[in-house]
Image: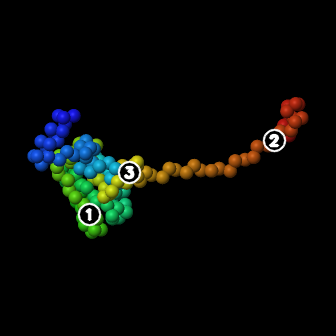
Amino acid sequence: MAEDLNQRIEQAAQGITPQTKPDERRRFLGSLRERAVLRLSVSETNDLQATKLFLAHLQDYKDYTVLINGNMKQNDFINEVMSACSNQKIKFTLISDETAQTDPQATGILIVAKQAVNRYRIGIKQVYAPDLPTPRLTAAKPKKKSHFWSKIFGRKS
C-alpha cells in the first residue's frame, strides 16, 4: 500500500497521470467502450458492403464524433468518410498515436458519444444486420376427418 502511494506521488511529481482502463483505450482509439456507438474494424473498411452501410447511415450520427485510425493504409473510403463528415458538419478526429493499430481486427473507424451510452452491439454488421427472410405462408388444406366407423372397418369416406 505504501509502495503504491509512493509510486503515485512520484508520478504526480513528474506530471504523469495514471490512465483508467488502458487496454480498453488501446482497443477503442483512446476512447472507452461505454461511449462507443458504432465500430468498423480495419478489415471492414475494405469491405464494400460495410462501407456502403456506414456512409448510408452517417447522417444518423450528427451529434457524435467520428474517430478515424490514422495509421491505416489510406484508401478511398477513408478519404470519402472525411469529406462526408466535413460536408455534413460531423466532427471527426484522426488518431495516429499508439492506440491506432493496424491489425485487421483493430478499430478502423469508431463513432463515439461525449457521455456513456453503453450499447451492447456496436459492430456495423450487428447494428445494421440484414433483415431475416420471411417464411412463405402457404394455405394449408384442411385435413378430412375420418368417421368413427371408417376407423373400425378401415374404409375411407
The residue at the point 26 percent across, 51 percent down is 31
The residue that mark 2 highlights is: 145
Which of the two residues, 3 or 33, is positioned nearer the viewer here? Answer: 3
Badge 2 marks a residue whose secondary structure is: loop
The residue that mark 3 highlights is: 118
Q: Is residue 32 visible?
A: yes
Residue lying at the far left of the rendered structure: 14
Q: Is residue 4 above or below residue 68?
A: above
Q: Distance between the residues labelled 2 and 1?
A: 69 Å
The residue at the point 70 percent across, 47 percent down is 140
Left or right? Give the position of 155 relative to 17. Answer: right
Q: Which mark's residue is nearer the viewer, 3 or 2?
A: 3
* Amino acid type shown at disc 1: Lys
Badge 3 marks a residue whose secondary structure is: loop
The residue that mark 1 highlights is: 91
The circle on residue 39 is: none
Quadrant location of the N terminus in the rendered image: top left
Which of the two residues, 13 or 78, is positioned nearer the viewer here? Answer: 13
Q: Is residue 101 above or below residue 84?
A: above
Q: Which mark's residue is nearer the viewer, 3 or 1?
A: 3
Q: Position of residue 86 (x, y in %)?
A: 25, 66
Q: Distance between the residues labelled 3 and 1?
A: 21 Å
Badge 1 marks a residue whose secondary structure is: strand
